[in-house]
Image: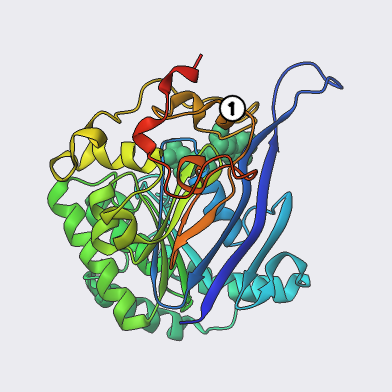
Amino acid sequence: MSEILSMKNVSVHFPVKGGLPFFNRGVIQAVSDVSLTIRHGETFGIVGESGCGKTTLANTMIGMVKPTNGQVLFNGTDLNALPREEFKRTRRQMQMIFQDPFSSLNPRFNVYQLISEPMFIRGEDSEEAMVARVVELLELVGLSSEDLYRHPSDFSGGQRQRIGIARAISLNPSFLVCDEPVSALDVSIHAQILNLLVEIQEQLKLTYVFISHNLADVKNICDRMAVMYLGKVMESGDSDKIFRDPKHPYTQALLAAVLDTSFDERRKQAILQGDIPSPINPPVGCRFWQRCPQAMEGCKTVPPGLIEVEEDHHVACHLVNGFPNGELPQDYDRTLAKPDVRS
Ligand SMILES: Nc1ncnc2c1ncn2[C@@H]1O[C@H](COP(=O)(O)OP(=O)(O)OP(=O)(O)O)[C@@H](O)[C@H]1O
Ligand SMILES: [Mg+2]
């Protein structure tokens, strides 16, 4: 399967706001040196704790945020090197569904205006064609033409998310980022909207990036995934492989926290302690070492590379791959690692 999007060594830094003018305030390293590939027609999951850079990474994929370093290739072309008009045209193939269907829809617009807005901005369609298209989209997402002139306040959370989905697919995109699309919805609606997303993906042959805190959802619907921590990818690849045999201590801890029934004693001990360090001044070595139950001395200073450990399964961890100077063999027994290096 060929790639629809690939990121090569992408970093995104934001200036720190506030403080004294002309004083060096440093930068927030929201995304650091991320490389990954997303294949045509798949669902690619991004997981990780709040603030680890998931939304920033997704915004960079669709050209909403420019990378400070690195490249984003969409169907092989460097998105950020395109001339303005071509960038706009390409951008239309990439859309986003947001977490909060209450704040992402303008309350003064009616359903027709909300869903047709992207077509209106593009300016290629007649009023008649837009009405017909909106009706078609409403039916696709499980609403009806009777809803055309109603306002967002007339709908439930689940229905509003349906409107958000219709709007996102109105220009026939091929690449859709779903940023926590169901986390604001209650449990029963949650499943309905997920099912709708899966149906639409099959019908329209879409590629999804699915950002979620809910690992059960990721396990159910994602083909491949990346686990992020403090702006870095810790583990990535085939999601079945990652769920079956998580290699990174961070992934193990994340999975143990939610799917504890399927894990053995060693992993149960891996519940995370402490907070995520600041992305303004991240640790020099492995970004996870301060919270890692198996951190070794070298983890403090040597950043681990993301290395393929089996086909389509990459891990950035010295326990798994050894240090670059060969200090640890591949079959190093991770249970021997001393946790006492943490200060
Ligand atoms: N426009 C911005 N300007 C400055 N800092 C930003 C900006 N956007 C994000 N950040 C910072 O970058 C880091 C990553 O944020 P991001 O929103 O990508 O995380 P996230 O993983 O999506 O979190 P959540 O799960 O809470 O949505 C955070 O420290 C955040 O404060
Ligand atoms: Mg986010």
Q: Is residue 150 visible?
A: no
Relative to residue 139, is residue 52 drawn left or right? right
Mark 1 CB within 8 Å of ligand 1: no
The location of residue 104, given as percent across then percent down, is 43, 50
Q: Which residue is drawn at the image coordinates 41% and 20% (left, top)?
A: 274
Q: What element carries label 1?
A: helix
User: Which residue is identified by label 1?
Assistant: 300
Q: Is residue 276 visible?
A: yes
Relative to residue 123, is residue 192 drawn left or right? left
Snapshot quadrant of residue 252: top left
Q: Which residue is drawn at the image coordinates 12% and 52% (left, top)?
A: 188
Q: Quadrant of the N terminus?
A: bottom left
The number of numbered badges drawn on the structure is: 1
Task: Please determine whether, in this image, residue 77 is positioned above or below residue 342.
Answer: below
Q: Residues within 10 Å of mark 1 (few under 14, many from 20)?
A: some
Q: Which residue is drawn at the image coordinates 44% and 86% (left, top)?
A: 129
Task: Please determine whether, in this image, residue 61 is positioned above or below residue 30.
Answer: below
Relative to residue 262, is residue 27 drawn left or right? right
The location of residue 159, given as percent across then percent down, is 24, 58
Snapshot quadrant of residue 166: bottom left
Residue at the extreme top: 343
The location of residue 248, given as percent across then percent down, is 41, 44
Q: Which residue is drawn at the image coordinates 49% and 24% (left, top)?
A: 290
Name the quadrant where ligand 1 sits: top right
Task: Please determine whether, in this image, residue 90 is positioned above or below residue 304.
Answer: below
The location of residue 111, given as percent across then percent down, is 35, 63
Pick the residue in front: 162 or 223. 223
Pick the residue in front: 22 or 320. 320
Amino acid marked by disc 1 = Lys
Pick the residue in front: 214 or 317. 317
Task: Please determine whether, in this image, residue 340 is positioned above or below residue 243.
Answer: above
